[in-house]
Amino acid sequence: MEENRLLRIVLYLHHRLERVQRKGNLPVSLSQYRLLYMIQQGPARSVELATASGMTKPSIGALVSQLEERGWIERRELAADKRAASIRITPAGRKAVTRFEVGMQEALEQFLGEDAVQRADEELEWLLDVLQERRSQAHVDWALRKSVSSAET
């Protein structure tokens, strides 16, 4: 059972964070935060967000609509492709992200203690590097699939 330890810890913390978000005065859900975080890294298209997040296009579309209604993101038509839109985070979206992060950080520190959170941050730096590599590779894979399908048509 030792090999499932990380998974159990991640799922447990995710559950705790969901409870904090629901009980707290945080305007952003975990799914919305995840999408805002990705968009904050730079403008993206819905298909890129779906690929990077592992979510379906309809799920991303629903989240994008929610975030747009709240004024946290905006869509801009791409000059090269009128069917596609670039999605950007707005200043209000950045504020919502910051408020969410502060609330979650406080909840984690209250639950685990400041020392444990700081130690976890230090220990997990390598994992963040791995995740970033995977995210970059997913984007490269998507771009390759897109160019191959474009070449076939």
Image: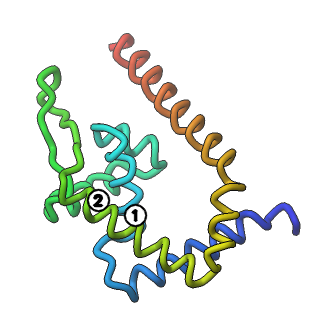
Give the residue number, with chain letter if any, for mark 1.
31
> Which of the two discs, 2 and 1, labels the residue nearer the N terminus?
1
- The colour scheme applied to this rendered structure is rainbow
117 to 129, vertically: above or below: below
**Residue 39, image x, y percentages:** 32, 46
> Residue reaching furthest bottom?
23
Secondary-structure class at tag 2: helix
Q: Are marks 2 and 1 in contact (CB under 8 Å)?
A: yes
Mark 1 neighbour class, 10 Å CA radius: few under 14, some 14 to 19, many 20 or more: few
Q: Position of residue 115 (x, y in %)?
A: 67, 72
The residue lying toward the viewer, choosing from 69 and 144, is: 69
Q: Which residue occupies 70% across, 70% down?
A: 9
Identify residue type, mark 1: Ser
Task: Say whether residue 147 is left or right of residue 96.
Answer: right
Residue 69 or residue 57, whichever sits in front: 69
Q: Which residue is mark 2?
A: 63
Task: Specify the quadrant that holds the C terminus.
Answer: top left
- In the image, what residue occupies the spot 41% across and 79% down? 21
Between the C-alphas of marks 2 and 1, the distance is 8 Å
